[in-house]
């Protein structure tokens, strides 16, 4: 049974050094780079905290764009002929080893989707993009309704029109 998690914006009080996901790249980013990217207004970072306020997982969210010609032809036909479309990008998603396999990754992904959908109400964006680090990660996103770009199979997108928000 997974414990309850609080998903909140990363701040200085959170101990990033104790986080271990098993991915050196994702762990190093959280420990050494994310605060610089936040200060430079390049990304926002959201963390899932366990009952002891330890980071159990995190994801980053930033603005992005999609080249219209990168989309499947069936979608291009439904869209205006802009050269690119506004989007949000979930650049990183990591779950601490202790919590892997408990659904926290899906919980964080759902939170990112809901934040993107909420932002869509205010500024407008077509989709949420993700960059899968490997085929296993790509399968996770496909399971959650994402679509592969034909020219970049490790980059996937979820049209926000497919998501409904309550209230």
Image (cartoon, rainbow, N blue to C red):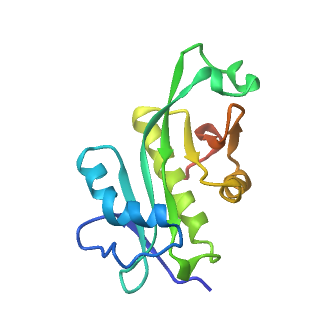
Q: Where is residue 64 shown, x and y percent of the image?
A: 46, 35
Number of residue marks: 0
- State which quadrant residue 74 falls in: top right
Of the pair 149 and 52, the residue shown nearer to us: 149
For the view shown, which residue lies furthest in the top direction? 81
Q: Position of residue 147 (x, y in %)?
A: 70, 41
The residue under the point 38% across, 63% down is 30
Q: Residue furthest right?
A: 74
Residue 15 location (% of width, % of height): 31, 76
- Image quadrant holding the N terminus, namely bottom right
Q: Position of residue 139 (x, y in %)?
A: 73, 55
Query: What residue lies at 26% left-to-right and 53% top-to-bottom?
Result: 36
Residue drawn at the location 51% of the way across and 72% of the way down: 21
Residue 120 makes an appearance in the image: yes
Q: Is residue 167 visible?
A: no
In the image: residue 76, left or right of residue 125: right
For image coordinates 62% across by 72% down, the residue present is 103
As displayed, is residue 167 above or below residue 50?
A: above
The front one of 91 and 126 is: 91
User: Quarter-wise, where is residue 157 in the image?
Assistant: top right
């Amino acid at each position: 049974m997974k414990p309850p998690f609080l998903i909140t914006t990363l701040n200085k009080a959170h101990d990033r050094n104790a986080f271990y996901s098993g991915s050196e790249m994702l762990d190093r980013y959280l420990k050494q780079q994310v605060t610089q990217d936040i200060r430079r207004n390049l990304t926002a970072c959201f963390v899932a905290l366990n009952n002891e306020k330890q980071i159990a997982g995190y994801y980053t969210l930033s603005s992005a764009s999609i080249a219209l010609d990168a989309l499947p032809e069936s979608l291009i036909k439904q869209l205006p002929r802009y050269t690119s479309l506004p989007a949000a990008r979930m650049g990183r998603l990591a779950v601490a080893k202790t919590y892997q396999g408990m659904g926290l990754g899906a919980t964080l992904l759902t939170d990112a989707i809901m934040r993107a959908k909420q932002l869509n109400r205010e500024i407008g964006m077509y989709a949420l993009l993700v960059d899968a680090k490997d085929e296993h990660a790509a399968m996770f996103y496909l399971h959650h309704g994402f679509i592969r770009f034909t020219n970049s199979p490790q980059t996937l997108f979820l049209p926000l029109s497919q998501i409904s928000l309550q209230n």
